[in-house]
Image: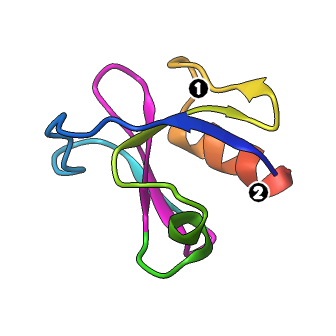
């Protein structure tokens, strides 16, 4: 599986507040910010973190399938799990 992402260092996104969150295979938290972007928060020492994902990375595609602001957290998590 190829996850395309870019790092959003220093943006102040904390995962707090009303944003929806889901856990992706116990490897990372996945949430949606107020602009509809899907944000990854890998758990320490898990495959996502070991692969180089960092807190507040924005997921832009899964195996070439674009992740858009119109998609819900549940849709994205399902896309990741299906792949």
C-alpha separation, residue under disc 2 versus residue under disc 1: 15 Å
The secondary structure type at the circle numbered 1 is loop
User: Looking at the picture, does residue 58 appear above or below residue 53?
Assistant: above
Which residues make up the magenta segment? 25-42
Residue in front for this viewpoint, 46 or 74: 46
75 magenta-colored: no
Question: According to the image, what is the colour scheme of the structure?
Answer: rainbow
Q: Quadrant of residue 50?
A: bottom right
User: Looking at the picture, does residue 54 appear above or below residue 50?
Assistant: above
Determine contact: label 2, label 1, CB under 8 Å.
no
Across and down, in percent, residue 5 comes to: 55, 36
Residue in front for this viewpoint, 36 or 57: 57
* Horizontal arrangement in the rendering, residue 46 relative to residue 40 (left or right): right
The residue labelled by disc 1 is 71
Identify the disc placed on residue 40. Answer: none
Across and down, in percent, residue 16 comes to: 17, 51
The residue labelled by disc 2 is 81
Packing grade of label 2 (10 A; few <14, some 14-19, many >=20) is few
User: Looking at the picture, does residue 45 appear above or below residue 6?
Assistant: below
**Label 2 vs 1, first from the N-terminus:** 1
38 magenta-colored: yes
């Amino acid at each position: 599986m190829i996850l395309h992402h870019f790092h959003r260092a220093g943006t102040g996104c904390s995962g707090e507040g009303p944003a929806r969150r889901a856990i992706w295979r116990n490897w990372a938290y996945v949430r949606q910010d107020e602009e509809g972007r899907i944000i990854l928060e890998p758990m320490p020492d898990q495959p996502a973190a070991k692969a180089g994902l960092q807190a507040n990375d924005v997921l832009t595609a899964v195996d070439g399938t674009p992740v858009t602001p119109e998609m819900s957290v549940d849709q994205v998590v399902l896309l990741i799990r299906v792949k």
